[in-house]
Image: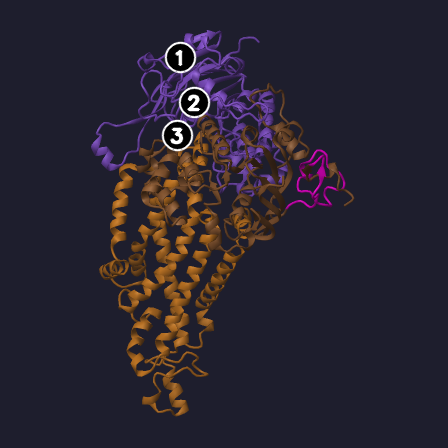
Amino acid sequence: MPERETLVRVNNLKKYFPTHGGLIEGLLTPQKRFVRAVDDISFDIKKGEVMGLAGESGCGKTTTGRLIMRLVDPTEGEIYFEGNDITRLKGEELRRFRPHMQMVFQDPHASLNPRMTVGENIGHSLVIQQIGTKKEREERVKEVMSRVALTPVKDIYTRYPHLLSGGQKQRVVLARALVLSPKLVVADEPIAMADVSVRALILEMMIRLKDELSLTYLFVTHDLATAKYICNRIAVMYLGVIVEIGTVDQVFHNPMHPYTRALLAAVPVPNPTLRRHHIIARGEIPSAVAPPPGCRFHTRCIIAAPTCSERVPPMVEVDPGHRVACCRLDEWKKRTI
Amino acid sequence: MDDAILSITGLSIHYPTSTGIVKAVDNVSFSLPRGKVVGLVGESGCGKSTLGLAILKLMRPPGEIVAGKILLDGENLIDKDEAQMRRIRGPKVSMVFQDPMTSLNPLIRLDRHFLETIDAHERNVGKDDAMARINKLVEHLGISSSRLREFPHELSGGMRQRIMIGLALILNPKLIIADEPTNSLDVIVEAHFLDLLKGLQKEYNLTILLITHNMGIVAQLADRVAVMYAGRIVEEAGVMDLFARPLHPYTKGLLSSIPNIEVDQMRLYTMPGSPPDLTDPPPGCPFHPRCPNKMSICDKKTPHDIITDGRHVECFLYGGKDA
Amino acid sequence: MVSGFLSKPFRFFISMSKEHKGEWYIIVAGALILFVIIFSSVFAGIIAPYGPVTDVASPYIKEHNLDLRAATPLPPNETFIMGTNDLGFDVFSRILFGSRTVLLVSIAASIFSALMGIPIGLLSGFYGGKVDRTLSLLMDSIYSFPGLILAIALAAMLGPGVTNISVAIAVIYVPTYFRIVRGQVLSVKEELYVEAARSIGAGPMTIMTKYVFPNVIASVVVIFSLNVADAILTEAGLSFLGLGLPPDLPDWGIDLAKGKKFVPSGYWWIITFPGLMIMLVALSFTMIGEGLNEVLNPRLKEK
């Protein structure tokens, strides 16, 4: 595969949210406390690929997606889109930049304006971006609707979202993201809310549209099986940091970080002949307000050494493009689990 | 399957709504063999949760059982009144729900949850005896008994779910109905919980009805599987048979449409359409509009009680056309 | 383009109504009562058999040679279906003309408070911060004041007149709109579709007018009709206390006030009919309001 161009580059990105403590808590602890949702991550997204962001809830994957979408302002770090720094874009500049990146939200029902028809929901971005005449806009919306198989187009165009099925709503959300012809689509758990029998349809449609419209996806998910199916590369996040990143082949067939291994081992496989629960992580995800020092995973890691709580593990390239942040890599390699 | 702890025959549950009657459960028959885990799988709205709740006659109003029998150890629960049902819920059958946070009272400590449960059913137990029993069970579930003095919100999601299973087990029931018990848990915690559940099941020889939409969980845990679609059980089989050789087109479609982490898949099967609106289900077999094997009979007659190779599958592909 | 403009909310309404038959009946019943009252108030000049301030009893007494002392006010009979009052005015005609005052004042007051309360609530909830805290404090202090007493004080300050009494009543309901709208805005602005609007480049004004406001307006419609019902009672209360309206204006509240002293003498009809009408109008608005509440806020029912 030829080296692909970089579409998005993220450098040392951080996002700290102030905690909403009560009045009394505020008096007791005068210094502000922060949820370190994203804490110094760097990665890039290549043109035409599906980049996955995976991890448990609260690992910062959704915040990362929203940061790249410039829906929240980063605390530190830079985001480059086609080489241009978009971190500080504001107001009119940001509005004109928006069409390049669009988002598919997790909950299709909640992400559609219930007081707008399907056509208006999809087409409003064209109005805001002042694209085309009213008639041209309608044409464009209908074209995108037929691309995502929202048929009969004429009928659904004037319907309100609450009259659609879950799968149809998800396709409306997809159509809204595509109507501006974006280069990057950030998909935040796009199938988590869909019925099981409808999920494959949405996935297959996303793959087809990616090829047809030469899109790039950032696919945020907690479901590793789905990530494996749709992604080319994947970054595994834990408590605001990336612990492992590489191609799907590298990460799934040769996982190097203990957390990645634990995640993979925990996935319930839909095959009763493969019953295996090697539980290789303890406990639950700690609070992102006060993440453990050193390696954030050491409190749950089964190969943690005393040094793990002292040293922040650096990202080490173990294979071309396959990077892991673990101090115990050598120890890990010796084991055969 | 003679030794069934629970057997349901011809159960139908209707919800009258302003737009018509929702047939949430439509003429369902199945049984739970003692000491086994039976997975009840289906998509949201297929009626699986209603069926689970109906076993304890807990379905939300205005839902009502319009036909059928629910035999628990030979006793028909349909005839029981509310007071009698209360004596069954807990000591004989108990439930584990998907969201432990809403099932626990946030204002009372965990030990009181247990004490009140015991108190409601067993008159002659002293507090010390009860506490000893509670401590033993909770430690067994991997939670330090000192944490029983805490409030539900002080526990992590995984621990809360363990407390829920503890509450379900404290009265020593033989049958547990678990409705999406791991839905609110992350994958690693989920794996821990499922391991725990499997261990408890073996240890206490429990029968578990595991209601879920996740085929992976069923494959990992269940002995038998019932697949539900549009209020009906369309296929029921042993877990090995079902996954190795699914018969119903819905089961086949479902199994080949889910991504599997163990396999490098090229394409997923995409099932057309979406699950039907239960106020206005399609005539005949409710799956026929999405079925790749649709025959002319399928939209005219509803398949019923079709047995092939000793397996129950509600599909005309396997007979029943003349009946 | 009027039809296009109207067809959208209409379609939305129709689509909602299919799911809520029961509530729909309540709304229609309320609307029918209200329609009859509005119709008769608009055409009071034609429908009413007599003028509101015409002494019709005296000629009647003369004509029928009744004993003057025993006969005023006249009880309901074939000529005066609701009787006459102490001044000889026909109660039925006064009720028809009086509905104009009641409806005018209460609806004007409600519109005025909606026009004040909605934008303030919208801005306060949307922008938050110091503006929000100041406005909330102000509105809460008005709200914490007993409504009728505040209206009495304002009516006394502003002096008599239909406009003044409308303003006096309006002020006490501004916080109701403010609180409802602000609360709704606070929850709506966290909705995913607002974030989706930002992701397509919508600015604060667009988000407020196209995404937040339309999703808040449903509860405002509900509040409005419940508010008119309440304003009717307040207006009647103020008139009953003799505040605000010129005394010669036909008004149900005034008629109640003036008629109350005749109740011990057995002249029940002077206050019963205005009283019933106040109840009926308030009821019709409440029915519409509560019905709309059920229809437009389906989310409330799911919980």
- Which tint was used for chain A? purple
Residue beneath the point at 56% across and 39% down: B34
User: Within 10 Å of the Cα at label 1, are there few (<14), some (14-19), or many (20+) other Cα atoms?
Assistant: many
Q: CA distance from mark 2 to mark 1?
A: 26 Å
Residue A78 horizontal/vertical position (percent): 38, 17
Coordinates of residue B216 in the picture (x, y in percent): 55, 28
Q: Secondary structure at mark 1?
A: loop
Residue B90 visible here: yes
Residue of label 3 = B142
Image: B11 above or below A243: below
Tell me the subunit letter for badge 2. Answer: A
User: Amino acid under label 1?
Assistant: Cys
Majority secondary structure of magenta residues: loop
What's the magenta region? Answer: B281-310
Which color has been applied to chain B in this rendered view? brown
* Disc 1 target residue: A326
